[in-house]
Amino acid sequence: MKDNVAPGAGANGQEHPLPARVQEALGELVGAAREGLMALSVGVGLGVLAELMEEEVSEVVGPKGRHDPERVAVRHGHEPAEVTLGGRRVRIERPRVRSADGAKELELATHRHFAGRDLLERLVLERMLAGVSTRRYRDLGEPVGEEIEAAERATSKSAISRTFIARTREALAELMGRRLDDLRLAVLMLDGIELKERTHALALGITTDGVKIPLGLWEGSTENATVATALLADLAERGLDTGQGVLCVIDGAKALRRAIRDVLGTATPVQRCVRHKERNVLGHLHERDRPALRRRLRAAWATEDHARAAEKLQGLAGELERTHPGAAASLREGLEETLTLQRLGVTGQLKRTLESTNPIESMIEIVRRVQRNVKRWSSGDMALRWTAAGMFEAERQFRRVIGYKQLAQLALAVERDISARKTPAEEVATLVPA
C-alpha cells in the first residue's frame, strides 16, 4: 500500500514549501471560492495568466537575479492592463519588457492573445442578436466575483452600443464586399423585407452543391424595379457570372421579375412561388370555398408532367371564370412560370424545395427575429447593418437544401433552356465581348 504523502511533500516524504507567490494566490482564492465555482475558476485562471506572463518574461530576459551580458531584453516593472473575460474587460497587472538598449518595449505574446477584443465583440454581437438589450447586457454576465465585477469595463450601455455598431458595420462591409467570381450558382432567390418606411431587397444563392449563401442586399423606399435592378447589378459587379445558367425563384413581385429581365436577360428561367400564387388566388374566394380549391391547386402543381399540370390549372381557371373572375385572372397571371420546374424536368424533393420561396423566407424570418427588439430605425445605415448581421446569423444555421443531389442536373437543364430561348440579339451579345 502506498503511503499518503502530504501536499507539497516530495517522494521521500520531505516537505517542499510552495513558492510564496503561489501561497499568496491560493490565499486569495479562498475568498473567491465563497462566491461560487465560477468565481473560483476565474480567480484560478487569472492567477495562471499572471504566471504564464512571468514565465514568458523569464524566457525572453532570462532567470531573475542572474546577469547575462548577452541578453537582448530587460525587465521593466509592471503596469495596469486589460484582458477579455466572459464578455467584459478586466484589469490585470502586466509585466513589462524593454530591449536591452532601451530603444523599444517588447510585446508579450501571452498578453496579446488574451487582450484581444475579438472574443468580446463576438459575444456582444451574439447576445444582441439573441435579443439582449444594451441596458441588460451587464446583468447577464457570468458571476465572476464581486471584486472583478466592480472593476469590469466595456459593459456599459454606450460601450456595448459602440461595439455592436462596429461589429455590424464589419458584417455589412463583408457582405457587400464578397467576391462571387468562383461561385457556381444553380438557383438565385430574391425577396424583400419591410422595415417601417424602408425596404430591403435580399438575394440568396444556392450553389450546385446545395449550399445556401447570402449574396447581398439593397435599400429603397419600396420594393421597386430600381432597387431590385441595383441589387442584381451589384452582384454582377462583384463577379457573379450573369452568363451562366441560373434559375431565379421569386414570390411573383413584378419589380423583381422586371429586374431579372433587365439584368439577367429575357431567357433566364423564373419559378414563381406556388404558395404566394395560391394565397393570391384563394384571397378572391369566400372562406368556405377555399379548402376545395386549395386541394385542386396543390394537386395540379404536384403533377410532374408539364403539359398535364398546365392543363389542370387552365381548367381550374376556366371554371373560376364564371363564379370568381378575379380568382381566374389571378391564376392565369404568370401561370406558366409556376410550372417552370416541370418544364425543366425537375422532380421529387428538389422540386418541392424550389417551388416556393421558403429557403429565402427562412433567412428573412431569422433577420426579423434578431431585429425584434429594435424600437426605432434612426438611419438607413442602422437598418442595413442589422439586416446584414441577421443574414450572417442565418448563414450560421444553414444546411444543404433538400434534394441538393439533383442541382447539378438542374444547372445543365437551365443552360439548355436558356440557349433554346435566347433571342438572336441576345445570342450576339453573348458572343461579342463587353
Image: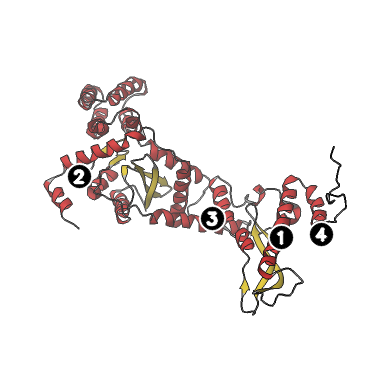
Pointer 1 with pointer 4, Cβ within 8 A: no
Q: Earlier in the sequence, mark 3 or mark 4?
A: 4
State the image coordinates of residue 406 (x, y, percent, origin top left): 32, 34
- Label 4 secondary element: loop
Q: Nearer the viewer, residue 425 or 285?
A: 425
Is 2 on the left-hand or right-hand side of 80? right
Kindly report the distance in space between the C-alpha atoms of the residues bearing marks 2 and 3. 42 Å
State the image coordinates of residue 87 (x, y, percent, origin top left): 62, 53
Q: How is the image coloured?
A: secondary structure
The answer to whether residue 268 is above or below residue 181 is above
Q: Which residue is mark 3?
A: 164
Which quarter shows the N terminus?
top right
Mark 4 is surrounded, within 10 Å at the Cα level, by few (under 14), some (14 to 19) or many (20 or more) other residues, namely few
State the image coordinates of residue 68 (x, y, percent, origin top left): 71, 75
Which quarter shows the C terminus?
bottom left
Mark 1 is surrounded, within 10 Å at the Cα level, by few (under 14), some (14 to 19) or many (20 or more) other residues, namely some
- Label 3 secondary element: helix
Q: Earlier in the sequence, mark 1 or mark 4?
A: 4
Q: Earlier in the sequence, mark 2 or mark 3?
A: 3
Kindly report the distance in space between the C-alpha atoms of the residues bearing marks 4 and 2. 80 Å
Q: Nearer the viewer, residue 238 or 271?
A: 238
> Residue furthest toward the left?
424
The answer to whether residue 23 is above or below residue 323 is below
Tag 1: amino acid = Ala
Image depth: mark 3 or mark 4 in front: 4
Does any portion of residue 200 appear in the rendered image? no
Q: Earlier in the sequence, mark 4 or mark 2?
A: 4
Q: Which residue is mark 2?
A: 266
Q: Which residue is mark 4?
A: 19
Tag 4: amino acid = Pro
Q: Which residue is mark 1?
A: 50
